[in-house]
Amino acid sequence: MAVTDPTLEVEREMLAGGASCVIGCDEVGRGALAGPVAVGLVVMTAEARVFPAGLRDSKLLSEPRREVLAPLAVDWAVYSTVGLASPQEVDTLGIIASLGLAAKRALTQLHVAGADINGSVLLLDGNDDYINKALSTPVNVVTRIKADRDCGSVAAASVIAKVHRDRLMIQAHANEPYYGWAANKGYGSADHMIAIVERGPSELHRKSWLKLSA
């Protein structure tokens, strides 16, 4: 089946309905065994420029293409940011609460930058509003399954967050190369699992996720 580029139709309907801006939201690193979980946010207004050609859900792009397209996504957005939650926070709080914490941190960065959080609609990939679970004052979140595939702002957030997190894992690889993070980005590849068994977990591992025999 051919892969089509996402559109901005959903976002434009939200803007026409009175939102001052749409904030596309997506997470990366949710299923990794090591490294932080990241939530990317991208702000779009009615004055949005032409969407970058070829920009789509990060899972549908090769690593070199993501590296090319991420700066185009940043330039296209009014604002963009990535929030992180650490492996220790994932172990302590659980993955859903950690996603909410990462999103809260990203929203704080957007607020400082000048984004109108209260007047916006947050378009979140998936069907679970983990963002409001982390906030004391609710924001307007609309969840949408496959939003990273169908909605341009969410695809942009996906690529920006993926490249940001991948670069962190590549940097970590330089200090602990035996886990192979430059290639697997903290996910459970065969070589990664063997290294965990042979060397034990590192500070970047989500220890509560590891199933190691005693």
Image (cartoon, rainbow, N blue to C red):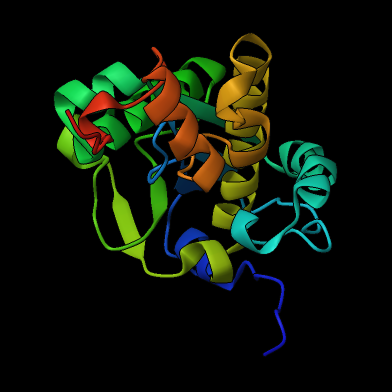
Position of 95 with respect to 44 (left or right) is left
In the rendered image, residue 175, in percent from the top left (x then y), is placed at: 62, 9
Q: Nearer the viewer, residue 164 or 112?
A: 164
In the rendered image, residue 92, in percent from the top left (x then y), is placed at: 16, 21
Q: To which quarter of the image does residue 102 belong?
A: top left
Residue 125 in view in this figure: yes
- Quadrant containing the N terminus in the rendered view: bottom right
Q: Nearer the viewer, residue 104 or 66?
A: 66
- Quadrant containing the C terminus in the rendered view: top left
Position of 130 with respect to 44 (left or right) is left
Count of labels in the image: 0
Is residue 171 positioned above or below 116 on the image? above
Residue 20 in view in this figure: no
Q: To which quarter of the image does residue 191 belong?
A: top right
Q: Residue at x 55, y 27 (%)?
A: 179
Q: Residue at x 67, y 24 (%)?
A: 170
Is residue 28 positioned above or below 113 on the image? below
In the rendered image, residue 201, in percent from the top left (x then y), is placed at: 37, 20
Position of 9 with respect to 136 (left or right) is right
Q: Nearer the viewer, residue 95 or 46?
A: 95
In the rendered image, residue 144, in percent from the top left (x then y), is placed at: 37, 66
Q: Residue at x 81, y 43 (%)?
A: 72
Q: Residue at x 46, y 63 (%)?
A: 14
Is residue 27 positioned above or below 146 on the image? above
